[in-house]
Amino acid sequence: MKSEERGRKLDVKILGDKQEVGAAAAKHAAESLRRILARRDWARLIAATGASQFEFLEGLTSASGIDWRRVELFHLDEYVGLPITHAASFRKYLLERLIRKTGITRHHLLDGERNSGEVIREVGGELRSEPVNLAFVGIGENGHLAFNDPPADFETEEPYLVVELDEACRRQQVNEGWYSSIAEVPTRAISMSIRQILKAEEIVAVVPDARKAAAVKACLEGEISSNAPASILRRHPNTTIYLDRESAALLSQAISRSI
């Protein structure tokens, strides 16, 4: 399916289940990284975290023919105040599921235990120094993109910002098993901004699971709005969204038949 928006095209691919989604998205991402590294000395990459990315990252880190020593990594978000030893730490997640598996040496992780302003200046400065070639993202149950919960800031040009996490976002973290209760989930996070995400030359969104179905429908078939933050992906010139049948379940029959 190609969704038209202001002359741009959004590719939506629907697979059977999250294993198929992960494998297909990993193949796509690996091919993109090989193509980037064939024409550049470095590939600048943004990686997402969360339960939706498990199968995808497993497939990607197993792909052959990628010189990960030439990949520079940034990530989307991190909780303010959360130690790296916590199971929900996104730094811990990326170290275990991507960095150590591939041997990436050039990475810029958001340290939520440090002063947030300093982290934003340092990592944001590195991020803005050159174009980003490829970004991996997900879509939250509330339609968030990174930790930009609705209503998201579509205007700021800052690369990162400190955001307040809404209840739906925090409850998702409990539902995915990262915390035992919503009271344990931090209320603030450092998040890459919407405009910064859209500056990536290519975006691959991996969005399996029935829990995402309402958000997928709102973001793909509703208005492009800060109340459905990931809807803004429809204005990016080179985005592919991978869904499984469960996350695509509420899309119109016409869209489902076109896949």
Image (cartoon, helix red, strand yellow):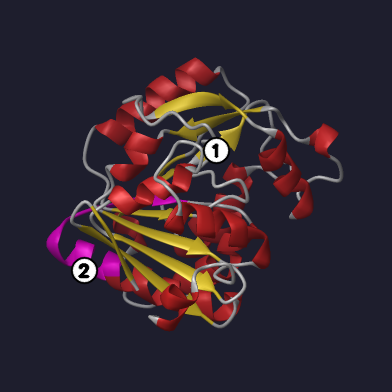
Q: Residue furthest left?
A: 39
Toward the viewer: 165 or 134?
165
Assign the N terminus to one quadrant of the image.
Answer: bottom left
Residue at left offset 45%, top offset 47%: 230
Q: How many marks?
A: 2
The x and y percentages for residue 48 are: 50, 51
Give the left or right position of residue 134, taking residue 183 as reference.
Answer: left
Query: In the image, is residue 65 above or below residue 96?
Result: below
Name the residue that disc number 1 marks: 147
Query: In the image, is residue 65 above or below residue 171?
Result: below
Toward the viewer: 97 or 177?
177
Name the residue that disc number 2 marks: 35
Query: In the image, is residue 85 above or below residue 243?
Result: above
The crowding category of the residue bearing disc 1, from other C-alpha atoms within 10 Å (few below 14, some 14 to 19, many at least 20), is: many
Q: Amino acid at mark 2?
A: Arg
Residue at left offset 61%, top offset 51%: 93
Highlighted range, magenta:
32-47
Q: Amino acid at mark 1?
A: Phe
